[in-house]
Amino acid sequence: MMVSKDEAQRAVATLLEYLEGEGASEREGLQKTPQRVIESWTEIFAGYTMDAREILDATFNGEGYDGIVLLRDIEFTSTCEHHLLPFRGRAHVAYIPVDRIVGISKLARIVELHARRLQNQERITKGIADDLEEKLAPLGAAVILEASHGCMQCRGVAKQQAVMTTSSMRGVFFERPEARTELMQLIQQPSL
């Protein structure tokens, strides 16, 4: 059953009353908060309305290119499904084409599709790699995410500098250490 926008706004108003007490919705600063929250969530969670097949649909002839294609340092922000707190970081997405290549903006968009949902970092990493394999059928696909998690920084253990790294190595990146080593060297090169 689909929840209406009005029902979602009422749920936010209920949460505000839980936090602030009865009459929270009458305070000037909170009067439009339920509407603002739902509008922001529509943008933050836009990944639910995106389709990986559409994003990766426009491929091009690789013209025999058989090296690593890497888009690194793709900034992303996601929301932890366990605490509804943000986590943010960088994604490095790579593949080795067989016949088809994809525009580089599509690699950033596929990261956004997965990040703009209630998530855990492991699922984002795996989902991006799955999509690359399914659509491009490359010799190898690799996805590495590095992120700082709000749920670790502002509650619980309160570790401000902790960074979680996840990776998914497929095909030659999993099977051949030299391919993985070359990828890691490319990722670690100084930025422009």
Image (tube, rainbow, N blue to C red):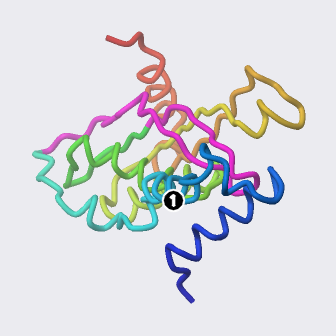
Image coordinates for residue 166, horizontal then vertical, percent: 63, 41
Determine the residue positioned at 43% across, 54% down: 43
Which quarter of the picture shows residue 18? bottom right
Range of residues picked out in magenta: 64-92
Image coordinates for residue 22, horizontal then vertical, percent: 81, 59
Q: Main secondary structure of the magenta part?
A: strand
Residue 114, relative to residue 63: is it above or below?
A: below
Residue 113, relative to residue 155: is it above or below?
A: below
Image coordinates for residue 117, horizontal then vertical, percent: 53, 58
In-front residue for pair 39/47: 39
Asked whether, in this view, residue 2 is left or right of residue 83, the answer is left
Asked whether, in this view, residue 99 is left or right of residue 151, the answer is left
Determine the residue positioned at 50% across, 25% down: 184
Q: On the image, numbered disc 1 is attached to which residue?
A: 35
Going by the numbered disc 1, the residue's amino acid type is Gln
Element type at marker 1? helix
